[in-house]
Amino acid sequence: MGAKVDMIAGFRNKDIIILEDEMKAVCDNLILTTDDGSNGNKGFVTDALRQNIENGSNYDLVIAIGPLVMMRAICDMTKKYGIKTIISMNPIMIDGTGMCGGCRLTVGGKTKFACVDGPDFDGHEVDFDEAIKRSRTYFDMEKESTREYNCHLMEGAKNA
Ligand code: FES
């Protein structure tokens, strides 16, 4: 569509980098970061974005998709630079019709439902503190369930 697109994607290490060719195919410039630096580019996506901005990339728009804490960090940064930022909220959803309230969040001081009003929102308007608190509602039960059913999914991810 004529837009120049930089894509920044972060991974824990080089062994779990996926879809590299597919990402390259849909952007002008792909930057892959790893937490441990095993791909030769140590850092978080926030570091790479800050570096690009400071090096003169004049972004009209940032789209951030990922963990809440990452999206909050991106929004905190882009707010300072005055760059419009869209984030994608992925809270616990139950009915997906705006009736149950499970996916409720506050955007611009107003109650919104990610399932029917989103999931994309202006990141500078989202109450991340509330969203993060709500995302931990079932944390103890999830931990107990992991233990109860001997689920090693997260351990595997940690060791990947
Ligand atoms: S999932 Fe129930 S209100 Fe959105």
Image: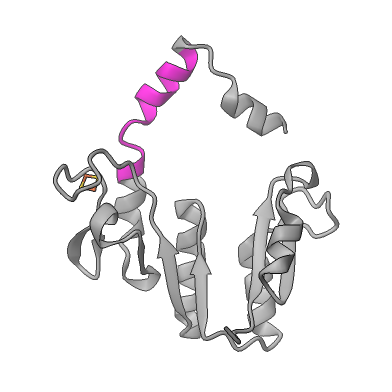
- At 48% from the left and 82% from the top, the residue drawn is 83
Q: Is residue 119 above or below residue 54?
A: above
- At 52% from the left and 57% from the top, the residue drawn is 70
Q: Quadrant of residue 158?
A: top right
- Left or right of 118 in this view: 1: right
Q: Which residues are magenta?
A: 134-147
Which quadrant holds the C terminus?
top right
Q: Is residue 148 above or below residue 29?
A: above
Give residue 9's position: percent from left, percent from top. Answer: 66, 59
The secondary structure that most of the magenta stretch takes on is helix
Residue 105 appears in view: no
Residue 6 appears in view: yes
Q: Is residue 150 above or below residue 18?
A: above
Q: Quadrant of residue 49?
A: bottom right
Tell which of 22 and 18 is nearer to you: 22
Tell which of 23 and 41 is nearer to you: 23
- Left or right of 99 in this view: 138: right
Which quadrant holds the N terminus?
bottom right
